Image: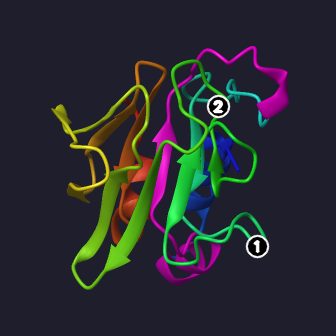
Amino acid sequence: MLEPLSLYQEKALALSPGEFHAFCPHPVFVVEPFEEAEDTSFRTMQGRVESARRPGLAVAPIKKRPDANAFTMMITLGRASNNDISLNATGVSKFHAYVRADGDGHTLTDAGSSYGTEVAGRPLKPRVERAPLRTGDVVRLGQGVRMTFVAAADAQRALAEWGG
């Protein structure tokens, strides 16, 4: 689910590190505004969420959504409403990509999307290449969605200071 960046910024500035970690225990994507797809059969959240500091920026916690899908070992991203992170955007496949946690952090894999996925400006080979995610990495899903990865350990500082 997409949530306003302003909510996370307010909490990052007001809470102690322990309190903020309890509020935001997962890594996040900071999602830029995107053009919503007109395909109403896959209608999900509005792509335009208002932020007090930068209109349109939203936060997507990278976590499993209860009863979202059968893929228990991955956090799915795509246009369909059964993804863990639903992005009803033009140029995003129904099941576009997925994130996995491993011992070293998180990786992103293109699920065989029609429109491609990039991490830090580098296109991923669909279904075979796992790109490690580090705070500040820009992820592109097709031409429709641009978002920035923020690790949980960096979230309070990065979101409090977010300016683009």
Query: Which portion, as a residue range, is magenta?
Result: 17-42
Mark 1 and mark 2 in contact (Cβ < 8 Å)?
no
- 77 on left or right of 113: right
**Residue 43 in sight:** no
Q: Nearer the viewer, residue 11 or 87?
A: 87
SS label for mark 1 = loop
Q: Nearer the viewer, residue 30 or 103?
A: 103
Q: Residues within 10 Å of mark 2 (few under 14, many from 20)?
A: some
Kind of residue indicated by mark 1? Pro
Per the model, the C-alpha gap separating discs 2 and 1 is 27 Å
Relative height, residue 141 to residue 96 (above, below): above
Q: Answer whether residue 129 is magenta in the image.
A: no
Q: Answer whether residue 18 is magenta in the image.
A: yes
SS label for mark 2 = loop
Residue 3 on image: x %, y %: 69, 46
Looking at marks 2 and 1 on the same chain, the residue that comes earlier in the sequence is marked by 2
Residue 111 on image: x %, y %: 42, 49
Which residue is depicted at the point 51% across and 71% down?
26
Residue 54 on image: x %, y %: 54, 25
Which residue is depicted at the point 60% across and 62% down?
14
Which residue, given by chain and number where applicable, does mark 1 sit on?
Answer: 66
The residue most toward the left is 122
- 135 on left or right of 96: left
- Of tags 2 and 1, the one toward the viewer is 1
Which residue, given by chain and number where applicable, does mark 2 sit on?
Answer: 51
Which residue is depicted at the point 29% across and 44% down?
126
Relative height, residue 144 to residue 105 (above, below): above
Q: Quadrant of the C terminus?
A: top left
Mark on residue 139? Answer: none
